[in-house]
Image (cartoon, grey):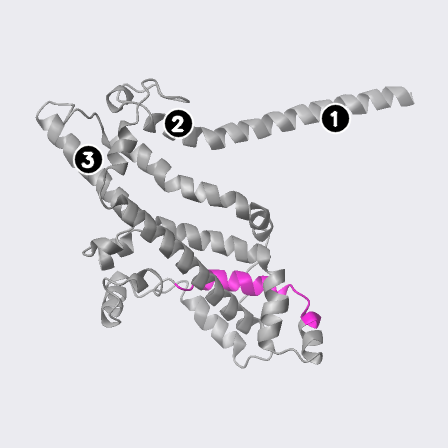
């Protein structure tokens, strides 16, 4: 009887493992397929892609789409600017977020509740694009690298997330440090920062993705200065030029220009890969912190 139960339990475990592995494999395929499909289309000849049927690998392999993207004069300058704004902007934003969150977590802060409420209001109320444009103009940030850093230096939402994380740290640790003679600066760097590494990695990744993907600020505030152009802005212009060129080709009933075959769809896929790969390369380095950081408690105000 006991042997029969053991065999039955083992059979149930095998069935459960099979179902679990099958479900996870399906989720993996569903997650990876769009990216693989984009990669396949980006390496496929544009005129052939118009027929459809490209799924996991290119049917007519070519580098023409990437040659079209990398042939732009300002692409490498824009790539350098995007890296700089991502590294500098993310670093400053993370530091500012941690400092504000730490201050709001201090129980002796006078008006702590009122300040938190006022900051929370900014999550729902915004002046809009025109007041922001006028403010940046008055601050003389036009056509300066600072326009990529200062306006988005702080996210109140991330401040509340970090403050919630700090609030979960036993306050006795800070009190014990104060008894030993530590001031707020020492507590911040010796206790808060090391414990908050998962949260820092999480918000840092979001800040970095936001900086990397941003192009509207370049368009509005720095588009007239080529030395300040960014990768996403240049990729957007490449796509626009490809769309206009294709429209002109269709109007003239032509499909090839200067020996190159491209289309807005093929250029869009190549651009997607060029813009995505750097973030994919960075993600594994913060993954172990990122997973834990996503399990933060509810945001408190």
- Quarter occupied by residue 153: bottom left
For disc 1, the marked residue is 13
- Quarter occupied by residue 152: bottom left
Work out how far the residue at label 2 is from the one at label 3, CA to CA, in angstroms.
21 Å
- On screen, residue 167 versus residue 277, left or right, reads right
Residue lying at the far left of the rendered structure: 252
- On screen, residue 248 versus residue 102, left or right, reads left
Can you tell which mark lies on residue 37? 2
Residue at the spot x=83%, y=20% of the render? Answer: 7
Can you tell which mark lies on residue 243? 3
Work out how far the residue at label 3 is from the one at label 1, CA to CA, in angstroms.
55 Å
Work out how far the residue at label 1 is from the one at label 2, CA to CA, in angstroms.
35 Å
Question: Along the polypeptide, which appears first: circle 2 or circle 3?
Answer: 2
Residue at the spot x=40%, y=21% of the render? Answer: 57
Residue lying at the far right of the rendered structure: 1
Which region of the structure is painted magenta? 153-173
């Amino acid at each position: 009887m006991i042997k029969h139960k053991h065999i039955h339990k083992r059979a149930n475990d095998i069935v459960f493992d099979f179902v679990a592995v099958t479900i996870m494999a399906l989720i993996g395929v569903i997650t990876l397929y769009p990216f693989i499909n984009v990669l396949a289309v980006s390496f496929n000849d544009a005129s052939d892609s118009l027929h459809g049927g490209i799924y996991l690998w290119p049917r007519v392999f070519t580098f023409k789409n990437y040659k079209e993207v990398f042939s732009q004069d300002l692409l490498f300058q824009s790539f350098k600017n995007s890296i700089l704004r991502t590294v500098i902007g993310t670093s400053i934003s993370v530091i500012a977020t941690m400092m504000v969150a730490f201050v709001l977590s201090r129980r002796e802060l006078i008006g702590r509740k009122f300040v938190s409420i006022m900051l929370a209001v900014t999550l729902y109320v915004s002046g809009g694009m025109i007041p922001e444009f006028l403010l940046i103009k008055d601050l003389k940030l036009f056509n300066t690298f600072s326009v990529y850093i200062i306006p988005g230096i702080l996210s109140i939402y991330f401040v509340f997330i970090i403050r919630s994380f700090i609030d979960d740290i036993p306050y006795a640790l800070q009190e014990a440090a104060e008894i030993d003679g530590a001031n707020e600066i020492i507590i911040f760097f010796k206790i808060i920062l090391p414990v908050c590494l998962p949260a820092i990695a999480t918000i840092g990744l979001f800040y970095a993705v936001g900086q990397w993907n941003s192009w509207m600020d370049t368009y509005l505030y720095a588009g007239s200065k080529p030395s300040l152009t960014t990768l996403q802005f240049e990729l957007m212009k490449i796509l626009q030029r490809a769309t206009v060129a294709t429209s002109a080709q269709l109007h003239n009933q032509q499909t090839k220009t200067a020996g190159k075959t491209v289309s807005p769809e093929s250029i869009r896929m190549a651009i997607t890969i060029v813009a995505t790969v750097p973030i994919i390369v960075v993600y594994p380095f913060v993954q172990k912190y990122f997973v834990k950081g996503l399990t933060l408690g509810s945001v408190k105000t």
